[in-house]
Image (cartoon, rainbow, N blue to C red):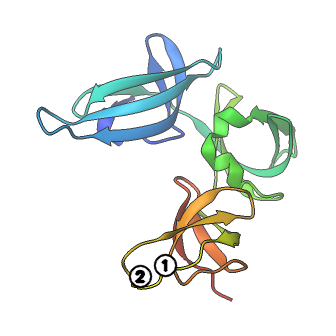
Amino acid sequence: MKIQANTIRPGMVLDHNGKQWSVLKIQLIQPGKGGAFIQVEMRDLSSGNKTNERWRTADTVEKLMVEERDCQYLFAEGDLLTFMDKETYDQFTLPKDAVGDPAAFLQDGMEVQVESIEGKPVGCTLPQTVIMEVVEADAVVKGQTASSSFKPGVLENGVRVLIPPFVAAGDRIVVNTADATYVERAKG
């Protein structure tokens, strides 16, 4: 299925130069002169090689039809993540690279969507947000207003995020899994 390059999202699988590529990261670049373009970091599903590709926003690319199934994350062993299909109870593994940076937010028993092409798992989509505990938060700089800026913090999984000045170590916050950004303070 042909799609415009500006609709490419992480987790999609593209057919490019006769190979299947999983999209890891995208960046929209708008230079001061000339038209905008999309910089896409992708991984070859068969060899695991990574590459960067650029397309103008109006270019079209071939998106592969991917079958999605509800699965449960079980555990990690080295660089392999183990999942279980919720319908058939079959267990299978997926390399951590196939999930990308959001793999840091996987939690035991988490329900995820695993994408497959011709029955072979190629990627995984986590819930949009997760609740994490802040284990380290820098002190607020005196004179800083609440709306002016964010301060660095470290989550229980070791991921660094920028958090508002009112969040302290021990607080639980909602984090966007796609780009590891603060959403809001967790309720309750």
Q: Farthest residue toward the left?
A: 33
Q: Which residue is mark 1?
A: 141
Report the residue at 80% width, 34% height from top: 79
Residue 25: % across, % down:
48, 38
Report the residue at 42% width, 39% height from top: 26
Query: In the structure shown, which secondary structural element does the residue marked by tag 1 occupy?
Result: loop
- Quadrant location of residue 158? bottom right
Up/down of 101 relative to 22, above or below: below
Up/down of 146 relative to 1, above or below: below
- Quadrant location of residue 93? top right
Tell me the kind of residue under disc 1: Val
Q: Is residue 13 left or right of residue 96?
A: left
Q: Which mark is residue 45?
A: none
Up/down of 84 relative to 44, above or below: below
Quarter of the image where the C terminus is located: bottom right
Q: Which mark is residue 144?
A: 2
Residue 111: % across, % down:
73, 57
Mark 2 closeness class: few <14, some 14–19, many ≥20 residues within 10 Å: few
Tell me the kind of residue under disc 2: Gln
Q: Is residue 156 left or right of residue 35?
A: right
Q: CA distance from mark 2 to mark 1?
A: 6 Å
